[in-house]
Structures are given as structure tokens and as C-alpha cells.
Image (cartoon, coloured by chain):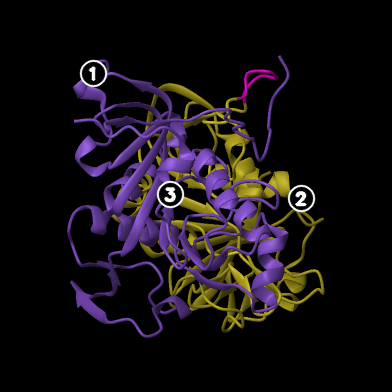
Chain colours: A purple, B yellow
Amino acid sequence: MNKVVANAEEAVRDIQDGAVLMLGGFGLCGIPENCIAALVKKGTKNLTCISNNAGVDDFGIGLLLQTKQVKKMISSYVGENAEFERQLLSGELEVELIPQGTLATRCMAAGYGMPAVYLLAGYGTEVAEGKEVREFNGKNYLMEMAFDSDYAIVKAWKGDKMGNLIFKDTARNFNPLMAMAGKITIAEVEELVEPGELDPMYIHTPGIYVHRIFQGKDYEKRIEQRTVRKK
Amino acid sequence: MPLNKEQIAKRIAQELQDGYYVNLGIGIPTLVANYIPQGVNVVLQSENGLLGMGPFPFEGEEDADLINAGKQTITTLPGSVFFDSAMSFGMIRAGKVDLTVLGAMEVSESGDIANWKIPNKMVKGMGGAMDLVAAAKNIIVAMQHTNPKGESKLLPKCSLPLTGVGCVKKIVSDLGVFDVTADGFVCIEHAPGVTIDEIKAKTAGKLTIAPNVKEMAV
């Protein structure tokens, strides 16, 4: 079994205009840099992007916003991106803001084959509008649907040719959840190895969820807030 | 004198108990980590997927793959653990996090909180705030008592879109410490040099002064 594709261009080759994508990452940490660049180059339009954040003006999903390839963003926090805010306030961009835990759990539900989950977050707020409410043990919960996405695009630290993935530190975030949730899951990795080189005990995402994998290149790994202390 | 941000953080740190798992929001709440009392061991949870958040890295040792929920570079500590975002909010939702400290634009006398949106003006999103306030066992709000226009942020009802309903238990503002009870705000401490009359004048929601109200020790 070999899921390896040559590069990002080949991995995203069949993503059509109007596709629904999940993109892993938290802020700029653990984002699929290579695939985002390939989508910009390919010029795919009217994308719906499910991703915790929308990048910054000139990096991450911000690159797809600059080129107006995104029709709709589904995110929890978008505060770092002025172009995003401009497109939103002008009505060019559709945006659905949802609680971060709800976002994660709706990904998880898709990956676990559950159509919906009941969650507390957002009850009594505008997030609850139009959603079914159900009471359990005296508390009110919102019914939240599993995401239905065409592609999940994730970034891992290491992966093998069967698609097994390991994530590094907090670059894990949404990546393993989204990897489980895509109809087609594309993984770009910093280090692609042979099957058997990863210890089965320490694999985060089993390869059954991954359809395409490739060795990424030229990672910039930009830091959003460089905070340090003196020695 | 009203408290500065550091003093608000210092006062909140006095609420920490040994063995607590704590989630600190962005802004003043982050500063609480600098004032954890001696002998009190707490584990900081960062909702992007880390328990055991350590201090900022030394210059030159920062790692793009290791950040907190404020996207700042950080470090781990002995016993730290990473996990994905679903598990992170799973432990929050299941009530494993003992205390959440976060900022607010408005709090109502019944404990509603608004801190994520100003319609047609600010559209940043709620991040993890709605999940945290819906589930945490204990929520302390750290904020200025009034907005830049001088208007009270402690209100009968929030005017901004809500983040959560009936969830705030305590507020530490620059003017004092307030419990949020079934009977509205109860002032239990006032900042040094801040009078009860000033607190009354700057609190729009229902306010009671505790009989044993005292000066904050900061």
C-alpha cells in the first residue's frame, strides 16, 4: 500500500471550485503550508474553508483570502487578519464563527462516524439560533452536526508511506481530528519515512484515514507572537 | 487608587489552590501566571493542546511548533503533555479544569458574560471562550470596572452579544472584588484608596456591599 504523491500540486490536483476543505493548524502553527501554496497557484475558487483561524494577511489561509479564492470561512477566531475583516465587513466573504471546542468536536464527530453531538457551548447566545436544544440532567445542550467536508488537508511532523502520522508538540491541534474527517485526506509531512520506521505505539493518526501523503518542503513555520525571556 | 493590571492579576492569583488545573485567557489573565503563590502548585492548561505550560523560552530557543492559545512561543515543564483540540475541549467540558480566568467587555448581575463581538465593529470571534464559560466549574473575570468612555461594565443586562449565560462567579476589577450571586453583585473587597461610594457610582447592575467588606491586599 502506497499513498505517496510527488508533491503538493499532485495532492490537490482534483480539488474543484466550490469544494469544502478542512485545513489543520492553530494560528500559523501546524498549517499545511505546501498545500495552501499549491491551491493559490492552482487558483481554485469559491472554497469553503473550515479552519480554526484564517491566517494572517500574508501567510496561511490569508494567502487564499488575498487572491479571493475563499467564499466562506468557518472558524472560531479570526482576529489576526485585517484583509479578512475587510472582506467580512464589506460582505464579500461569508463567515460562520463557532466556538473552538464545537469546531473540534464537529470534526471529531465526522471522524468517528457520528452524525451529531450535543454540546453546552453557546447555549443562550446567538450561536444557538436555529439549533435544536435538548435538556440532559437539567442542562440545555445544542445539537451540533458533524462536518461534511470534501477534503481535509493536514500537516504532520512525520508520516510513513501508508499514511500513519505523528504530530509535533502543539502543532497537533486540529490536525488529527481533521485528518479523520475528510472524505479525502491529504497529509503533508516534514519527514516521510518507510512503513515500520514509526513506532506503532506513538502514531497519532492511523493511516486508514489518510489518502494522499507527500514529503513537504521549504517550511517557513512563521511565528505569530515571538515571546522570549532573557537568559 | 484603582489597581493596575499587574495588581488585578496578583489578586486573582490569591484564588489559586494547590493542585488546581487552570486555564488563563489572553490579556490580564495571562499575567496571573507571574504571581502564583509560593507552595501552590497549579498546572496551566492551554486550549490549543497543552497541559503544563511553562514560561517563555530563552531568546533563540523559541519553537514555532510550541505555542499557547495566544499564539505566543512558550515552553513545557516536567510532566507536560500535548493533545489534540477535541481532547482539550473534552477535558474542559467534562469539568476537569478547576478554574478559568478570562477578560470581559460586560458582565451582568446574573453572571452573563459578553466578550467576543461588537456588532458591525469588531468581528474577531469567540475562540474557546464560549466552551470555557459553558463548562468551567469556577470562572473569574479580570477586567477594568468601566469602559474607556467611563461607563460601567457591570450591568443589569449585557448589551453586547453574549458569550455565556449565568456563568461568572467572581469579578476582580481595578476597583474591587465582586461575587456574582443570585442577588446580583456583592462587593467583598475594595481596592486600596477606592471608596465604596465610587464603586457604587461606577456599578450599573444591582450591587450589595458585604457587611465585612475589606480592603484588598495587593
Magenta region, residue range: B57-62
Q: Which residue is mark 2?
A: B4
Give me the disc on residue A13: 3
Q: Is residue B57 left or right of residue B47?
A: right
Q: Disc 2, disc 1: CB below 8 Å?
A: no
Q: Nearer the viewer, residue A199 or B66?
A: A199
Same subunit, labels 2 and 1: the answer reads: no
Give me the disc on residue B204: none
Of the residues tagged 1 and 3, which is closer to the observer?
Answer: 3
Count neighbours of disc 3 (C-alpha within 10 A) and say few if under 14, some if 14 to 19, many if 20 or more.
few
Q: Is residue B192 left or right of residue B30?
A: right
Identify the chain of the residue marked 2, using the numbered disc in the image. Answer: B
State the image coordinates of residue B211 (x, y, percent, origin top left): 56, 68
The secondary structure type at the circle numbered 1 is loop
Q: Residue at x 75, y 73 (%)?
A: B197
Q: Which residue is mark 1?
A: A199
- Compared with A100, A189 (above or below) is above
The secondary structure type at the circle numbered 2 is loop
